[in-house]
Amino acid sequence: MEIKLSFPVDSPPLSVIAAAKLAGISLTIDSSGSTPAFQLSNGLKLRGTYVLLRHIGRVANLYGKNEYESGEIDELLDYTPVFSSGSEFENACSYVDKYLEHRNFFVGYSLSIADIAIWSALAGTGQRWESLRKSKKYQNLGRWFNSISAEYSDSLDEVAATYVGKRGVGKPAAAKPKEQSVNQQSKSVNGDTTEKGKAGNRPSFEVDLPDAEIGKVRLRFAPEPSGYLHIGHSKAALLNQYFAQRYQGQLIIRFDDTNPAKESNEFVDNLLIDIETLGIKARHMLMIHPVSKCRKKGWMGLSQNAETTAVEENMKLWKEMIAGSERGLQCCLRGKLDMQDPNKSLRDPVYYRCNPVPHHRIGSKYKIYPTYDFACPFVDAIEGITHALRSSEYHDRNAQYYRIQEDMGVRKVYIYEFSRLNMVYTLLSKRKLLWFVQHGKVDGWDDPRFPTVQGIVRRGLKVEALIQFILEQGASKNLNLMEWDKLWTINKKIIDPVCPRHTAVIEERRVLLTLTNGPDKPFVRIMPRHKKYEGAGEKATTYTKRIWLDHADAESISVDEEVTLMDWGNAIVKEISRDQDGKVTQLTGVLHLEGSVKTTKLKLTWLPESNELVNLMLVGFDYLITKKKLEEGEDFLDVLNPCTKIETAAVGDSNMRNLKRGDVLQLERKGYFRCDVPYTRPSKPIVLLAIPDGRQQAVLK
C-alpha cells in the first residue's frame, strides 16, 4: 500500500511519519500542503494528524487488541497535544511518568500508536526533552523512551535524523526531493516485516483466521482438569485470546471434564487461577456434560470383540453401560465407520466408555462419559464456535472431528492448527509431570522446576514476558524446539530496569576485612535501591570498620592490591591471613577513598559486621532431565537429573527484612532472585529463588 502524505514544510507530523515507517507503509511526501493529509489510492482523502495516526493504527494492528484498549489509546492521543504547550510540558512528563511506573508500553503488552504519538511528542521537542532525559528527573518515562528508541532504532533514528532539528521539529535536516519515499517496504496488516526495528518485531502471524468476520468470531480454550496449565497450554490460551480480541469476538473457557479418573476440583480451581494469571478474559466458563442420548443410533455400535451386533442387543448393552453394571463396564460405544480406513482415527473410534469412578463435580450421577474426541466437535458446534484452534500434533484427527459433525447433523467448525510449543530439557506430558509430584521429586505442581504457569511464575517469570514470548512465535505451524534462554532474556529486559538492588555475602568461609582507618563509629547513608529507577525506593547502608566479603573475592585479592568497595570507594589490602590449608581467613587494609574506581580490577560487594544482617537461603535450580529432547519411545526415567536443586546459605543487608513474597530483586554481582519466603524471625532465613537471566542456568554452586 502506498499513500501520499502532504503537510506544511515547517510542521511535519512526526508521529504519522514514524508510525508509517514502523508499520512498513510506503509514503510519498509532499511538503507543500497546508495541513497533514493522506491521499489514498482509492481517491479518498483524510486530514488531521491524529486521524492519520488512527488510520495507520487500524491498518497495521497498532490500535489495541480490543475496544477497551482502543479506548485507552484514544484517551492518550487526546492528551498528547499537551506536550506541545510549553508551560505544561513538564506537567505532562510528570503525568505519563507515573502512568508508566509499572508498564513497558502505554497500553497492553506491545507497541501501539499511543507509544508512537508520545515518543514523537517528546522527540519533537529536541534539546528540551534530551536535557530532562539525561537528568533522569522522570525515570519511568526515560526508561520507556530509551526502550522504544532502542527496540525500533532503525526506523526511529532515521525519522528523527530527517525531521527533528536541534531545536525541535522543523525543516528536514538534509535537503530531500519534494517527492520521496519514507519506506519502500510494504507490510501486511499482521506486521510480518522482518527488518530489525520494524513493527514486525511485534507479535505476528503467518495467516489470518480463514473466513473470520469482525464481531462474529467465537473461540474456545478447553483444558482438561487433570493437572495445572503449563507453558504449552499457555500458547493455546494466548493465541485464542489474541484472535478473539483481534476480530472483536468472544472466547469461552470450557473444561473437558469427561474423565473422572484423572480429574479433581483441585485441578479445576488451579486452572482458574492459571487462566486469571495469564490475563485471559473469557466470556463464559463451561463444562462438557455427559450426554446420554445420541442423535443417530443407527451408525453406532457397542464393542464386544464382535464386528456387528443387532440394534436391540446394542440398546440392551447401552442400558447396562448407563447403569454401570458389571456387564456395562465391559463395553464401550463406538462409531461404525470403516475399520479399513487409512486414517486410524476413522476406524470405528470409541465415543463413550463406562466409568463408575465418582466425578469431581457431579459425583456418581453418571456412569458413562463421552470421549473428548466425540464430545468436542459436537459441543463446539452447538456452542457456536467458529474456529477451533488446536496444535498440529492432532492433525490426523481432523477428519474424525469433521465426520462427527457431519453425522450429528450440526454445522461445521473450522479447525485452525498451530505448532505445539516444545521446550528444551522439558517434559510437558501431564502424566510425566504427575510422576514427579507423586514421587516427591518436586514440591508440587507449582515447583519452580516445573513448566507449569504457577511454577515458572514462582521462579520469577513475569507474565508479560511469557505473553511476549508466546505471541512473538505467532501461529506458525512449523515444529520448533524452543530454548528457555530466549524467554528468560525477555524477562530480564522487563525486570532489570525496575527491580531493586540488594547485597548478600555467601555464608560459607566469609572473610572479615578490617579497615584500620575506617569509621570508629558506624554511620548510615540512605541510598536508592536502583540508581536508575527512583520508583524502587531507598535503602539504608551501614558503614563500619569491619566488613564481610565473599570468600571467593577474598581469595582473588593480592597483598597491597587496591580494590573498589561498591557504593563506598577504594581500599588497599595490606595483610592476608590464611589457615593451614592456605585458605584466606582474614584481611587487613586501609581506605583509600581518593583512589580512582576506574583503575581497579576488583569491584567487590560487602556487608558491615552487624547483628542487623539477615539470614538468607539462595536456591538455584537445574532442569529435571539431562537430555534436550526425548526421542520417540525413550523413557524419561532414564535421563533424570540427579541434582536439580542447590541451596546456598548467605547473609544479606538488613533492608531485606521488608521483602514480600513475590518481590523480585537483584543481588549485586549474584543475579536476579524472587522472594519465596519473606522474613519472619532471625532464626528463619529469607528464601530467595534464583531467576535465570538468559545467559546461563542460574544454579549457585
Image: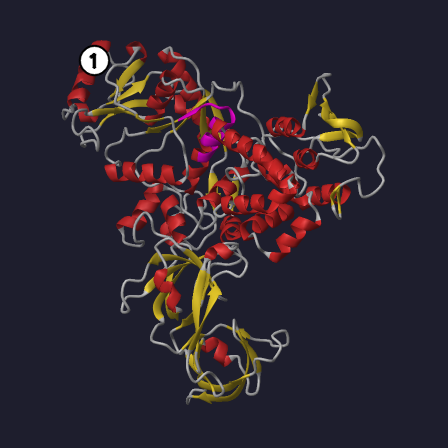
The residue nearer to you, when weighing 477 against 486, is 486
Q: Which quadrant of the structure image shows residue 664?
A: bottom left
The residue nearer to you, when weighing 41 against 623, is 41
Residue drawn at x 66%, y 33% is: 23
Decide whether residue 468 is among the magenta residues: no
Q: Which residue is mark 1?
A: 315
Q: Is residue 588 left or right of 316 when viewed as pictured?
A: right
Q: Is residue 286 above or below residue 639?
A: above
Residue drawn at x 37%, y 57% is: 675
- Quadrant for the C terminus in the image: bottom left
Q: Position of residue 432 (x, y in %)?
A: 34, 45
Q: Is residue 504 left or right of 534 when viewed as pictured?
A: left
The kind of secondary structure element at disc 1 is helix
Q: Which residues are magenta?
A: 238-251
The residue nearer to you, when weighing 112 against 71, is 71
Q: Position of residue 113 (x, y in %)?
A: 60, 34
Q: Which quadrant of the structure image shows residue 614?
A: bottom left
Q: Position of residue 38 (x, y in %)?
A: 72, 24
Q: Amino acid at mark 1?
A: Met
Q: Position of residue 131 (x, y in %)?
A: 66, 54
Q: Is residue 129 above or below residue 235?
A: below
Q: Is residue 2 visible?
A: no
Q: Main secondary structure of the magenta part?
A: helix
